[in-house]
Image (cartoon, rainbow, N blue to C red):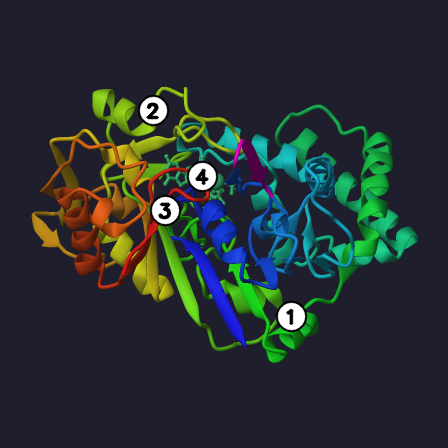
Amino acid sequence: MALDIVIGAQWGDEGKGRVVDLLSESSNLVARYNGGDNAGHTVTVGEKIYKLHVIPSGIIHSNTIGVMGSGMVLNPQTLLEEMTMLRDAGVTITPERLWISDAVQLITPAHRLLDRAKDAALGKAAIGTTGRGIGPAYEDKASRRGLRAGEILDRAHFEERLRIHFDEVNKILVGWYKQPALDIETLLKEYLSCADEMRPYIRRIGPMVQEALKAGKTVLAEGAQGTLLDVEQGTYPFVTSSCTTATGIFSGLGIGVQPVRRVVGVTKAFQTRVGGGPFPTEQDGDNALFLRGSGANPWDEYGTTTGRPRRVGWLDLVLLKYAHEANGFTEIFLTKLDILSGLKEIPVCVAYERDGKKMNTLDFSGDARLMAQCKPVYQNLPGWQEEVRGCRKWSDLPKAAQAYVKFIEDFVGVPVKTISVGPERSAMIIKD
Ligand code: GDP
Ligand code: IMO
Ligand code: MG
């Protein structure tokens, strides 16, 4: 019985896809339990780059079964596009190897329009959502009028519920947001046809996952987004609408509390964020260009889902410690160390100052308003000039790079077990 968990320790895009790809080799089930197609997980296999939004990244390995848990919000249209993309790449997608929970909440095109209208209406206070309808779908879930995948199994009932949903959203879009009316008949036809294709994959998955655990199989939970985007612990209100931390796994898969073997916190060697909200160590100018890249490389900091340039800055260890407190990491997977080659000194944030007081750890839960008042206190660590993309052993790394990694371990109190130095599968170092 082994439950392993991969969690983003920052504001998303830490490189979870590549970590899940690595751990999937020895896993039987790979499960998404939160979020929807706001996620963009990149897996690089030789020349091929997969960008997965809803199907668990581990599906690329033929030994796995992909599981989509009840904590997710799912757009059937995106699902079908992703199935086609994977099949074209030679990946087998059948109901035997992709299970979708009957309690998954459905995202519709109406949710997407509502998401964009709501965020635009916030003006300068906009969250900068991905526009995928995530917030409105979770709102419907919480207010108990959401559409669940299991309803698709009764077509007449589902059509009626869908019609009521489109009608309700239409009233809000037209009446409140002054948007054009939805073409309900066309939307219904398109959506029902996608839902029909999804039908064979829908089932009650909790007992199946539990059964697999009892039988000694390895289940890998693939977190989406990152701890600082968690709806409770994140930089509220600049967060997503789901539980992105390790704690969401049990309800998000419907399996009850289980012993966990590993909680892998994934962090970049620096900090990035997409969308609005506080970012104490954010950089602009030359530093930003250095960290983001110009867009020439596939790994440069431009959003996997929206293509937006990511905001970038120095590594924030106060927030990494905060993420550890929220998740209980058993190990850290450090990505993109290669990007830092060529700096004389590397600043890392080791404390905040607020109201003339120094804080080594956050004394509030995320709150964006308070975090915007925090000034970072930096410690400058020695940089290294050598290119590290060819390093495959701990001893291959320059001494200063080793010291950078050790500093992170000591500060957070969690071992860095793996370090990646490029997006490719082999471009990593297993420490110890
Ligand atoms: P995720 O959402 O956490 O799965 O991360 P994304 O896929 O959105 O973004 C991570 C980006 O960094 C992708 O383009 C990866 O291919 C790339 N990447 C991951 N690890 C490394 C690394 O060690 N070095 C470099 N240069 N790129 C990496
Ligand atoms: P992965 O899984 C980075 C951000 C959006 C926005 C906020 C709310 O690839 O790490 P939403 O559409 O969820 O309502 O947007 O959350 N966001 C992400 N940022 N990576 C992600 O996923 C994200 N998913 C959502 O940019 O600021
Ligand atoms: Mg991403």
Q: Residues within 10 Å of mark 3 (few under 14, many from 20)?
A: many
For disc 3, the marked residue is 428
Q: Position of residue 372 (x, y in %)?
A: 25, 41
The local secondary structure at tag 1 comes to: helix
Q: Is residue 205 above or below residue 20?
A: below
Residue placed under numbered mark 4 in the picture: 424
Q: Position of residue 124 (x, y in %)?
A: 40, 28
Q: Which mark sits nearer the N-terminus, 1 or 4?
A: 1
- Callout 4: SS: loop
The answer to whether mark 3 is within 8 Å of ligand 1 is yes
- Which numbered disc covers residue 293? 2
Describe the element under mark 3 as helix, strand or loop: strand
C-alpha span from label 4 to label 2: 18 Å
Disc 1 from disc 4: Cα separation: 30 Å
Q: Amino acid at mark 1?
A: Val
Label 2 close to label 3 by CB (< 8 Å): no
Amino acid, disc 2? Gly
Mark closest to the chain's N terminus, 1 or 3: 1
- Neighbour class for label 4 at 10 Å: few (<14), some, many (≥20)? some
Judged by depth in the image, the label closer to the viewer, 1 or 4, is 4
Closer mark to the observer between disc 1 and disc 3: 3
